[in-house]
């Protein structure tokens, strides 16, 4: 049998390494507020690097529980810093502190066919409001922010019987968009989707009414693709991607 020449062996090994690199998949656990915008960002990352991606979108609390129970993710992108910190405390993260990648914004949204044509924060005091959708404050950072805002406005006790509690912020947006609630306190990322812009309108919830929604990420320590996770976080911080995130509802973390 003829022996392969050393140069040919090196060429074959390089080709194998490139193939393995192209076939690796970065598995992302992503907060529900990222669902409207993250797929296109991941697609850009794949086009630039050849690294395939897959993402699971749920509330930050549900994803945290999955990770603590051994779910095989490589990167956790939460809607605040507290849930990545729980992963760090459990010794499951490569970082010692979460990487703050963006700042979320809470808005009040309603359909165009509701009675609230001149929508404002004071619309929350309108007796015509019978159902208000928010994400579950125990599971979702945007739900916690909504509860903070209602408390700050002195409206939580009054509106509590009217609240329609969603599992996550994406579901809260669906409840408002479908008419299951007349208004929704949702993420700006949801309000800026083509569907929500066409069917309704929104106002910003005053920032001083809720604690900052600093969104944080960690690469998981036992990840098979930790290097790809770190590379994606660097990609996310690039000026071009940061501008796209801001245009779609996520401000810079600073």
Image (tube, rainbow, N blue to C red):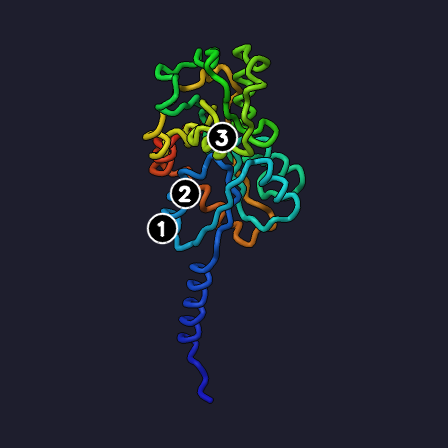
Badge 3 vs badge 1, beta-carbon distance below 8 Å: no
Residue 247 is situated, as x and y percent measured from the top left of the image, at 34, 31
Q: Residue at x 58, y 18 (%)?
A: 160
Badge 1 vs badge 2, beta-carbon distance below 8 Å: yes
Depth order, front residue of 156/117: 117
Read off the residue under disc 2.
Answer: 235
In-image side of 6 versus 66 (left or right)? left
* Alpha carbon distance from label 1 to label 2: 10 Å
Q: Residue at x 56, y 24 (%)?
A: 144
Residue 56 is situated, as x and y percent measured from the top left of the image, at 51, 45
Q: Secondary structure at mark 1?
A: helix
Q: Secondary structure at mark 2?
A: helix
Label 2 neighbour load within 10 Å: few <14, some 14-19, many 20+: some
Depth order, front residue of 111/61: 111
Read off the residue under disc 1.
Answer: 48
Read off the residue under disc 3.
Answer: 172
């Amino acid at each position: 049998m003829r022996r392969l020449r050393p140069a040919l062996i090196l060429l074959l090994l390089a080709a194998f390494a490139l193939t393995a690199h192209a076939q690796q998949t970065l598995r992302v656990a992503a907060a529900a507020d990222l669902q409207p915008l993250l797929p296109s960002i991941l697609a850009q990352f794949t086009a630039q690097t050849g690294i395939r991606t897959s993402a699971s979108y749920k509330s930050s609390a549900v994803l945290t529980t999955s990770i603590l129970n051994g779910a095989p993710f490589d990167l956790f992108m939460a809607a605040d810093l507290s849930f990545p910190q729980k992963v760090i405390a459990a010794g499951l993260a490569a970082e010692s502190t979460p990487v703050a990648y963006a700042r979320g914004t809470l808005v009040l949204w309603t359909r165009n066919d509701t009675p609230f044509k001149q929508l404002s924060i004071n619309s929350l005091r309108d007796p015509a409001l019978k159902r208000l959708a928010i994400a579950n404050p125990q599971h979702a950072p945007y739900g916690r922010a909504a509860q903070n805002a209602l408390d700050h406005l002195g409206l939580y006790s009054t509106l509590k019987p009217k609240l329609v509690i969603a599992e996550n912020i994406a579901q809260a947006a669906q409840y408002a968009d479908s008419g299951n609630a007349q208004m929704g306190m949702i993420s700006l990322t949801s309000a800026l989707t083509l569907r929500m812009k066409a069917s309704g309108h929104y106002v910003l919830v005053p920032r001083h009414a809720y604690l900052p929604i600093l969104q944080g990420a960690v690469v998981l320590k036992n990840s098979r693709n930790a290097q790809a996770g770190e590379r994606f976080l660097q990609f996310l911080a690039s000026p071009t991607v940061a501008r796209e995130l801001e245009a779609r509802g996520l401000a810079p973390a600073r």
